[in-house]
Amino acid sequence: DAKTTQPPSMDCAEGRAANLPCNHSTISGNEYVYWYRQIHSQGPQYIIHGLKNNETNEMASLIITEDRKSSTLILPHATLRDTAVYYCIVRVSQGAQKLVFGQGTRLTINP
Amino acid sequence: NAGVMQNPRHLVRRRGQEARLRCSPMKGHSHVYWYRQLPEEGLKFMVYLQKENIIDESGMPKERFSAEFPKEGPSILRIQQVVRGDSAAYFCASSPDPGRFEQYFGPGTRLTVT
């Protein structure tokens, strides 16, 4: 699986959009980008995934660059409950496989 | 649809005892994964099981750790002769049959070895 690089921490004001970057310059053509988050002491929570097109769901938007070497997770209106560690993971889609978690980005939403 | 259930949520064991952690996947999910999170560290994959089969145990310590997912009942992660270094949060995740991407995690079992 491709390696990912994320900033260790970020801050965002409540109500603003939180933009979390992820670099995955060695991504292969058949690898998807996944985002999970872990709110303090809880189990990780799936957020969104994508291959090459931008994706949006009720939680977030995922913007993947045209060369697929980086992506950005956008939380459009961050709330205090979005404070968590966010993990960007890249892996192939075939079959059910393990997730390889890096250190992630610790996002703090400030009132 | 109930989520992934893990029990116990907290488990205290003395060194040398056995720890049994249980995971009930979401209804209809036949793939179970176990992950471990040591204090102040990231999540590490341990083992991936389907019903009655271990598919990938590349993250399991070679000794004292075992896992099963029987035809009936929950998946069990078993740690024999626990040591203080086994103290961690153990998370179970499940996913539906291949074709879906996301894994759904349980609340975890926090194991403390005294």
Image (spheres, coloured by chain):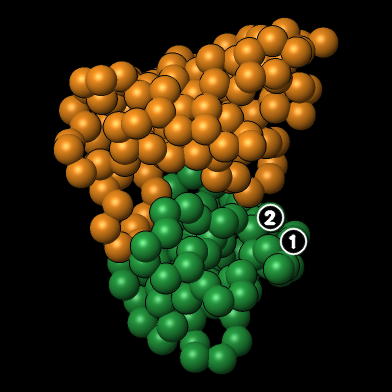
Q: Amino acid at mark 1?
A: Arg
Q: Nearer the viewer, mark 1 or mark 2?
A: 2
Instruction: Using the image as rendered, state which of residue B3 and residue B88 is in the foreground.
Output: B3
Task: Give left or right: position of A68 versus B27.
Answer: left
Asked if residue B87 can be seen in this view, the reply is no
Q: Crowding at label 1, few (<14), some or many (≥20) Cα neighbours within 10 Å?
A: some
Q: Amino acid at mark 2?
A: Pro
Do the residues under discs 1 and 2 have CB atoms within 8 angstroms?
Answer: yes
Earlier in the chain: of badge 1 and badge 2, it is 1
Task: Give left or right: position of B20 versus A68.
Answer: right
Residue B73 in the image, given as x and y percentages of width and height: 60, 87
Q: Crowding at label 2, few (<14), some or many (≥20) Cα neighbours within 10 Å?
A: many
Instruction: Using the image as rendered, state which of residue B91 and residue B65 is in the foreground.
Output: B91
Give the quarter of the figure containing the N terminus of chain B.
bottom right
**Which chain does orange denote in the image?**
A
Residue found at x 17% / y 38%? A29
Residue found at x 63% / y 13%? A17
Q: Quadrant of residue B49?
A: bottom left
Residue A60 in the image, given as x and y percentages of width and height: 58, 30
Residue A74 in the image, given as x and y percentages of width and height: 54, 21
Give the quarter of the figure containing the C terminus of chain B.
bottom right
**B85 up-or-down from A90: above or below:** below
Asked if residue A67 can be seen in this view, the reply is yes
Mark 1 → mark 2, Cα distance in angstroms = 8 Å
The circle drawn on residue B9 is 1
Residue B25 in the image, given as x and y percentages of width and height: 59, 71
The circle drawn on residue B107 is 2
Rendered shade, chain B: green
Residue found at x 55% / y 45%? A46
